[in-house]
């Protein structure tokens, strides 16, 4: 058997099929930055079709929460608590620290949260209640001083009540009823009396992702996200129906959301392929159309010679979500390295992580998992360093700095070190040249 055989090959990919929207987003951002709130309101009227309150007051939030059924409020609280506890565990791994590098020379690190964060919560085709939980809660656990939750309102309705409730429960300081590029711009530029966001996080459509990409550098972002993607690794012990259900459940994200099956069992592969169409047909709209397009154009089924080949294949995809339905789960856990989030065994599913296990569902897409992880408290924290020294503690550092600086050709740096040696050790002679010729400060 060749290393990989494609039993189903994608005809399109998220990378080659990306819409050309950069110019449109650039124009919207430039206009809003130049004209401010008036421009943002014009775009909101054009794209959101909403004329209600932009910044939700306490009464608006209470009214929205009252519309959420009690059992759903309990479910949101359950998920929010899990996310908060996972985030707190992550936060506890980072601490202020200090070390005496040399006698009299101390360096350290401090962990400082960003002052203001903006969390975009999608509300178009689906009301992403879980995204409000994942982004707002994590930012608040990190210690961000001010968190804005931004979500697109629906004409005559406003922001989905469950999104409002989840954002408020997570600790959002303000909830902004505005979608798309204009919502991202409002948070970044500090419109409507909001503090300018230092970091923008959360999923969104291609326009939201492009707006974040263009703003990156002026503000931080969690990642440049593409369409969500999911891969299942399965051997002969797996249940083909569960695999098919899981693939379809992720394909419903959108017609350009890739799903992949990688296996070493040909019979299993064809059994999954056979079951997917009926599962898609059984979905309601618009889920059915989204999943059908994703399966038709972007899905792949790959047959490998053995599990080592399956690992190599998975690593090349570096999927956002990676599920393993195979024997010897510890073996897979040890060998798999490139993924946004890993789901081991049929007892768990990507949907769990998307909604309620506590791990974050804002994850790297388009193979970015090969070099970065997903959203966590770490994205909202700055690890900064400090140093102090006695004159004697810095003596050796000054000598090394002067010589290295002159080797690099940076004479100004060298003289900053020279000056301190001259100040604190008057009358002494030091070799401060890069070529070992004697020099005096």
Image (tube, helix red, strand yellow):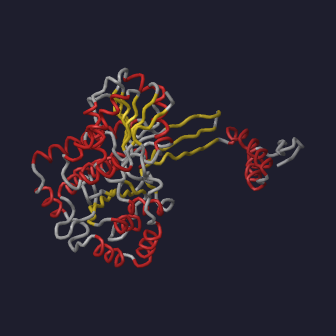
Considering depth in this image, is 306 or 277 the residue closer to the camera? 277
Residue closest to the far top: 328
Q: Is residue 136 above or below residue 436?
A: below
State the image quarter where residue 321 is shown.
Answer: top left
Q: Is residue 61 above or below residue 338?
A: below
Q: Is residue 64 left or right of residue 384?
A: left
Residue 405: % across, % down: 76, 49
State the image quarter where residue 342 is shown.
Answer: top left
Considering depth in this image, is 424 or 118 the residue closer to the camera? 118
Residue 350: % across, % down: 30, 39
Considering depth in this image, is 58 or 12 the residue closer to the camera? 12
Q: In percent of the image, x 28 and y 36: which residue is there?
A: 349
Q: Is residue 78 left or right of residue 359?
A: left
Considering depth in this image, is 367 or 223 the residue closer to the camera? 367
Residue 408: % across, % down: 77, 49
Residue 213: % across, % down: 46, 59
Q: Is residue 79 left or right of residue 42?
A: left
Q: In percent of the image, x 11 and y 45: which residue is there?
A: 71
């Amino acid at each position: 058997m060749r290393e990989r055989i494609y039993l189903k090959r994608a005809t399109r990919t998220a990378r080659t099929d990306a819409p050309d929207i950069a110019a449109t987003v650039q124009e919207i951002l430039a206009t809003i930055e130049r004209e401010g709130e008036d421009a943002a309101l014009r775009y909101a009227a054009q794209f959101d079709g909403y004329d209600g309150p932009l910044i939700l007051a306490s009464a608006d939030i209470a009214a929205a929460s009252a519309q959420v059924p009690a059992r759903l409020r309990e479910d949101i609280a359950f998920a929010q608590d899990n996310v908060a506890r996972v985030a707190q565990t992550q936060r506890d791994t980072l601490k202020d620290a200090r070390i005496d590098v040399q006698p009299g020379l101390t360096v350290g690190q401090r962990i400082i949260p960003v002052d203001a964060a903006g969390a975009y919560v999608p509300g178009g085709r689906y009301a992403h209640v879980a995204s409000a939980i994942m982004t707002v809660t994590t930012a608040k656990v990190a210690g961000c001083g001010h968190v804005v939750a931004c979500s697109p309102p629906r004409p005559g309705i406003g922001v989905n009540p469950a999104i409002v409730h989840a954002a408020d429960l997570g600790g959002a300081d303000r909830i902004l009823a505005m979608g798309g590029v204009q919502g991202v711009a409002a948070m970044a530029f500090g419109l409507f009396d909001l503090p300018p966001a230092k970091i923008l996080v959360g999923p969104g459509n291609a326009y939201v992702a492009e707006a974040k990409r263009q703003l990156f550098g002026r503000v931080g972002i969690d990642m440049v996200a593409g369409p969500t993607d999911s891969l299942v690794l399965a051997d002969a012990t797996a249940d083909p129906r569960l695999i098919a259900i899981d693939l379809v459940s992720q394909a419903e994200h959108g017609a350009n959301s890739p799903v992949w099956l990688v296996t070493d069992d040909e019979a299993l592969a064809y059994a999954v392929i056979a079951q997917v169409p009926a599962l898609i047909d059984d979905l309601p709209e618009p889920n059915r159309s989204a999943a059908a397009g994703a399966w038709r154009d972007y899905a792949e089924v790959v047959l490998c010679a053995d599990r080592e080949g399956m690992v190599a294949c998975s690593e090349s995809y570096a999927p956002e979500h990676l599920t393993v339905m195979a024997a010897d789960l510890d073996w897979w856990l040890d060998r798999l390295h490139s993924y946004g989030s890993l789901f081991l065994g049929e007892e768990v599913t990507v949907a769990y992580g998307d909604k309620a296990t506590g791990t974050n569902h804002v994850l790297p897409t388009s193979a970015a998992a090969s070099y970065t992880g997903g959203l966590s408290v770490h994205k909202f924290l700055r690890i900064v360093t400090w140093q102090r020294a006695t004159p004697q503690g810095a003596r050796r550092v000054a000598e090394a700095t002067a010589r290295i600086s002159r080797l690099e050709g940076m004479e100004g740096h060298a003289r900053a070190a020279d000056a301190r040696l001259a100040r604190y050790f008057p009358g002494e002679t030091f070799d401060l040249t890069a070529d070992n010729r004697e020099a005096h400060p």
